Structure formats: structure tokens, C-alpha cells
Amino acid sequence: MKRLVLLALLLAVAAFTATGCATSRVAGRERTTVLGGLVEINKNDYMPPPPSTVGVDSTVLGRTDKPSGTKTSLLWGLITYTNY
């Protein structure tokens, strides 16, 4: 039983790490996805975060002298940090 659980865990970790990283550019925006969407970074994306996410704005956490337009989503969009 322990071997089966260990094998299943090993296969899950291997599949999760094999997803890698992908970068795409569409209409002047750059989108980088890491580990199948676990971390997603959108540059020059000034769209507001969806209502189904916990939004954290750069004005709450720090200075906004030079907003970059970067939106970072964690845990498949559960938490979104915006810098604009």
C-alpha cells in the first residue's frame, strides 16, 4: 500500500513539474505561465482582475510612483496582485 501511494505521489510530482513555463505575446501584452497556471504574470495588462479573485493592489502594499501594468496571479487566479 505504501508503495502505491509513493508511486502515485511521484507520478503527480513528475507531471506537475513537467508542465514547465510558457510565454506568449498578444496585442502588445506578454503573458508568462509557470507550472500550468500556478503562477501567471501578465505584463502591460491594465484590465481589472475578475471578481472571483482576492485582489491586492500596489497602492495597498507600497509605492506607485511608476506603475508597470503588471498583473500577477497565484494559485490559478485565486490571488491577484496588480501594479497599476
Image: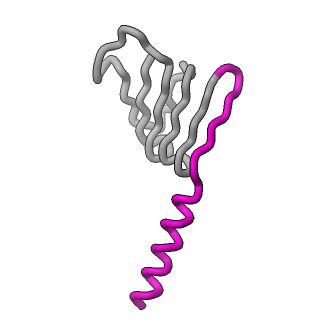
Q: Residue furthest bottom?
A: 1
Colour theme:
one colour
Q: State yes or no: residue 23 in magenta.
A: yes
Which range of residues does the magenta coloring cover? 1-28
Q: Of residues 74 and 55, which is closer to you in this image?
A: 74
Q: Taking 83 as reference, is 6 above or below it? A: below
Q: State yes or no: residue 83 in magenta.
A: no
The total number of labels drawn is 0
Residue 25 locus on image (x, y percent): 68, 29
Residue 7 locus on image (x, y percent): 49, 80
Check the picture and name the quadrant holding the C terminus.
top left
Q: Taking 16 as reference, is 69 above or below it? A: above
Residue 66 placement, left or right of 19 = left
Residue 72 placement, left or right of 19 = left
Residue at 43%, 13% (x, y): give it: 67
Residue at 43%, 25% (x, y): give it: 82
Residue 23 locus on image (x, y percent): 63, 37
Q: Taking 78 as reference, is 69 above or below it? A: above
Residue at 47%, 17% (x, y): give it: 68
Q: Residue furthest top?
A: 65
Residue 1 locus on image (x, y percent): 42, 91
Q: Residue furthest right?
A: 27
